[in-house]
Amino acid sequence: AGTFSVGAATVNFAVVALGGIVLGLAVGYLVGRVRDLLRAAQSTDALIEITVSLMTPFAAYLAAEMLGVSGILSVVSAGLYSGWRDPLRMEVETRRTAWSVWSTVLFWLNGLAFILLGLQFPAILATVSGRYSPAEILLAVGVVTGVAILARILWIFPGAYLPRLLSKHIRATEAAPTWQALLVTGWAGMRGTITLAAALSIPRFLADGRPFPARDIVIFLSFGVIVSTLLIQGTTLEWLICKLGLRADDTREKEDRLARIAAVEGGLKHLRASEAHQTTVADTTALTLIIAEYEHRLAELTAESETRALSRHHRKTGRHHRLNALRAERTVIDDLWRRDVITDDTHRPLQQLLDHEEAMLDAQSARDDEGAH
C-alpha cells in the first residue's frame, strides 16, 4: 500500500489547479484567435460564432482531462477569458443572440446539475448512511460548511485591502470598502451549481477499475454545504445588512451615468466632425437633427437630479404611448398574415423588428427604474 505525503499532495494539487487555469486561458485565447481569423475571412455568422462559444467549455474540459489537470478550473478560466474578450469581438446581432442563447443554456444546466444529483442521491445516501452514523454525518456537514463560510470571509478582507496597498491607482480612483460591506460580501457566498458540478465531476472509478474512494461522501457533503449555506446565509443576509446599517450603494449608478455621458460625448464629437463633410442640404439637415438629439441626451445626463427625475417621467410616458403604438402595429401585421395578405417571409422580419423595438423600450424602462431607486 502507498503512503500519503503532504509535500507530494501539495505539489500535485498545485500542478492540477494551476495547470487547469493556464490550460483554460490558453484554450480561450486560441478559440478567440480562430474566431478572429474567421471574421477576418468573412466566413462566419452569428450561428457559427455562438456554436463555437458553446463548444469552448467542452474543448477546455476535454483538453484538461487528456493532460490530467483540473477540468473545472480549465472551464472556468476559459469562460472568464471568453467573457472578457467576446463582447468586444462580437457583432451587435451576434452579441444579442448569444446573450439569449447562453441565458437559456445556463438555466438548463443549473437545473440539470440538480437533476443528476437527485438521480444519484438515493444510492449516495444509502452508502453514506451505511458507513457513518447520523451524528457523524451532521458533524461533517457542519464542519465543512463552517470552514467554507469562514474561508470566504477571511479571504474577502485581504482580497479587498491588499490591492489597495499595492496600487496607487486603486487608492486614487476607488473608495475604500467598509468592513461592514466586506462582511456582507463574505456572508453572501452561498454555494450552488459550481460546488455541485465539481463534486459530480469526480470519476466513479480509478484507472485500475477500483471505485473512487470517498466519492459518495464528497458529493453528499457538497449537497449538505449547498443546503446549509442557503438556509443559514440566505435567510440571515437581509437581517445582517439591516443590522450593520448598510444603505444602497450608488456606485453602479454613478458608473452608468459616467459611461453614458462619455459615450454620448464621443458620439457627439464624431457627428460634429462629420458636419464639414456633408455635401447636400438633405444630409446636413439629417445630421443637424441627430446632433440636436445627442445634445438633448447630454443635457439630460448632466442635469441636476430634479431635472433628471422629470425627464425620466417624460420618457416613461413617451414609452407607454410608443408601446401601445407598437402593439397596434403588431395586431395589424398579424391580421394581414392570418388573412394571407402577406406571406411568412414578409411577416417574420416585420415581427422581429417590432419585437426588437419593444425589447429596447423595455430595457430603457428597466434602466430608468434602476436610476430612480
Image (cartoon, rainbow, N blue to C red):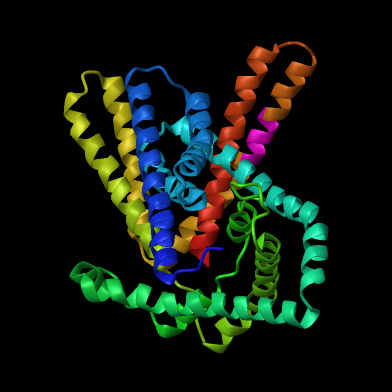
Residues in magenta, as a range: 323-329
Whether residue 21 is in magenta: the answer is: no
In x, y percent, where is residue 1? 56, 63
Picture quarter containing residue 331? top right
Q: Is residue 357 above or below residue 154?
A: above
- In front of the other: 274 or 42: 42
Question: Is 176 displayed left or right of 370 in the figure?
Answer: left
In x, y percent, where is residue 166? 22, 72
Question: Is 354 displayed left or right of 31 in the figure?
Answer: right
Q: Residue at x 77, y 61 (%)?
A: 124
Q: Is residue 237 visible?
A: no
Question: Is 152 displayed left or right of 353 in the figure?
Answer: left
Q: Is residue 102 visible?
A: yes
Count of numbered circles on the image: 0
Q: Is residue 370 above or below residue 333?
A: below
Q: Residue at x 36, y 41 (%)?
A: 26
Whether residue 328 is in magenta: the answer is: yes
